[in-house]
Image: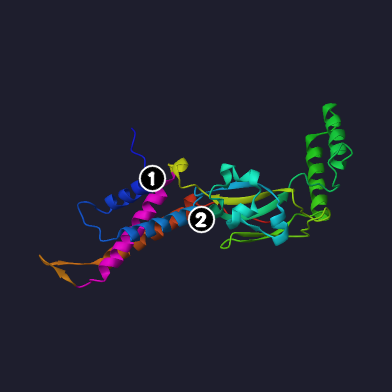
């Protein structure tokens, strides 16, 4: 059995109003207030729901502009990103979608600093692969060796330390940023930014608005707004002896909102990351 999917913000708004009784019941909430409550629901969905964001490895070419300023300003994409990267759809509205930055990784980084056939890791892998092909080595040994090399690389080379200011959309990479050839990063180098970004809200993500959590949460936020509007006229008796009771709507909405939040933490939220060391 099929059903009509909600594939736009307007359809989500209409769905929420119908659940509250419209058009049988007049919903005393303005269009601007409805838009604000839908924005609140989307923000909650993006920041805390497991389906509201996804992990992205963002390739970035370091520019001289970034070296001179000592930072990467995502809000200033035109100057902060190389021209050949701007045509990539991945950068569309990226400044508004980045939620957090987990790390930064240089490409082709290794403890020897060499990328030719005399590279230490290249020779070591060739030797190990030869042993494995002849049945001399074991995968367990190979895995242990790779973990050991990784630990040595972290101790001797280290990984870039970063500071990400979410509200300003600015990423600072701690290190020696120079325009010459001896800096930790120089113009023309490539890095990978390990970040989490929110889902897109344009036509390419038409299933976003059909999420059951988003529909329920937005409906109850609008319901609470409706109750707050009516509470301004508490005690007023309408023609026919009908009393306005906005406080009841507020209490019902608060109860349902709290239940939805608890369900989100138990069913929809990602488990916390644990750091050992």
Q: In this view, does 24 lie to the left or right of 229?
A: left
Which residue lies most toward the right here?
118
Label pair 2/1, CB-CB below 8 angstroms: no
Q: Relative to residue 233, is residue 133 depicted above or below? A: above
Identify the residue position indicated by label 1 in the image. 8
Classify mark 2: helix, strand or loop: helix
Q: Position of residue 137 (x, y in %)?
A: 84, 33
Question: 43 or 144: which is nearer to us?
Answer: 43
Residue 122 visible somewhere in the drawing: yes
Q: Residue at x 81, y 34 (%)?
A: 138
Looking at the rendering, the stretch of residues picked out in magenta corresponds to 208-235
Identify the residue position indicated by label 2 in the image. 47
Question: 64 or 115: which is nearer to us?
Answer: 64
Q: Which residue is drawn at 28% across and 66% down?
A: 229
Residue 195 covered by magenta stretch: no
Image quadrant containing the C terminus: bottom right
Mark 2 to mark 1 CA distance (whole Å):
20 Å
Q: Is residue 181 left or right of residue 203?
A: right
Query: Residue 54, labelled with which disc?
Result: none
Q: Nearer the viewer, mark 2 or mark 1?
A: 1
Question: 133 or 231: which is nearer to us?
Answer: 231
């Amino acid at each position: 059995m099929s059903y009509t999917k909600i594939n736009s913000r307007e359809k989500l708004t209409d769905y929420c109003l119908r659940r509250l009784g419209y058009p049988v019941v007049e919903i005393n909430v303005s269009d601007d207030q409805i838009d604000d409550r839908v924005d609140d629901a989307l923000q909650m969905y993006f920041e805390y729901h497991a389906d509201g964001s996804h992990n992205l490895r963002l390739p970035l070419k370091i520019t001289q502009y970034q070296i001179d300023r000592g930072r990467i300003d995502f809000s200033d994409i035109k100057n902060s990103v190389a021209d050949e990267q701007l045509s990539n759809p991945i950068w569309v509205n990226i400044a508004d979608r980045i939620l957090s930055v987990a790390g930064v990784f240089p490409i082709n980084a290794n403890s020897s600093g060499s990328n030719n056939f005399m590279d230490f890791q290249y020779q070591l892998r060739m030797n190990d692969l030869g042993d494995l092909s002849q049945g001399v080595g074991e995968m367990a040994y190979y895995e242990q060796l790779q973990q050991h090399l990784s630990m040595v690389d972290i101790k001797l080379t280290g990984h870039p330390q970063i500071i990400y200011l979410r509200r300003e959309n600015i990423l600072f990479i701690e290190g020696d940023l120079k325009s010459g050839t001896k800096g930790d990063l120089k113009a023309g180098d490539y890095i990978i930014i390990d970040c989490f970004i929110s889902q897109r809200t344009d036509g390419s993500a038409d299933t976003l608005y059909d999420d059951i959590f988003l529909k329920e949460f937005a409906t109850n936020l609008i319901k609470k707004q409706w109750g707050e509007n009516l509470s301004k006229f508490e005690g007023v008796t309408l023609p026919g002896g009908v009393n306005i009771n906005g406080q009841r709507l507020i209490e019902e909405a608060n109860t349902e909102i709290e239940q939805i939040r608890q369900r989100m933490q138990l069913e929809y939220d990602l488990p916390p990351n644990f750091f050992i060391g």
